[in-house]
Amino acid sequence: MTLGEILGMKLGDISREQLIFLIIFLAVIIAPRYSRIYYRIKKIFFLKNTFSQREREKWATQVHFDLFEKIIESADDPFMSDQKWKEWLPICRYSDDILREVLPKAQLASLENIVLNIINESDEISV
């Protein structure tokens, strides 16, 4: 089948199995990126102060606890190297800053300190 024939096809010319495969294929490609896009959009709205104070508090705490949960899940992962943990530091620092800005009196653990402790206590073998 040539490119001209593919471009000239109508939706009715595509079989049901091919259409289902195409939809699943696109969903698999888009799904991992959706969460990043969602947080980027929320970040833009957060910076533009379009949220009410209550919505900002809810969003900041949700991001903080989601990251905390991800750190706990990844703490025992043997494939997490010190370099990979160092890539998490700016994200954790940003989450900590937002949380301090929105809830200045909250006494929550700093994600950045947790990641730094994981890096410092690493049992990696250096060659």
Image (cartoon, grey):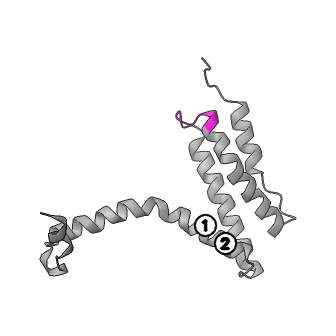
Query: Which x, y percent locates residue 29?
Result: 38, 60
Q: CA distance from mark 2 to mark 1?
A: 6 Å
Q: Are discs 2 and 1 less than 8 Å apart at CB?
A: yes
**Magenta part, dominant SS:** loop
> From the viewer's perspective, is residue 46 above or below residue 109?
below
Q: Residue at x 26, y 66 (%)?
A: 22
What residue would you read off at disc 2?
44
- Queried whether the magenta region covers residue 78, the answer comes back as yes
What residue would you read off at disc 1?
40
Amino acid type indicated by mark 1: Arg
User: Which residue ends up furthest to the front in the rendered image?
Assistant: 4
Left or right: residue 108 versus residue 6 is right
Label 1: how many residues lie within 10 Å, few (<14), some (14-19) or many (20+)?
few
Q: Where the C terminus falls, by quadrant?
A: top right
Question: Which stretch did the figure color magenta?
Answer: 77-83
50 vs 3, nearest the viewer: 3
Secondary structure beneath disc 2? helix
5 vs 121, nearest the viewer: 5
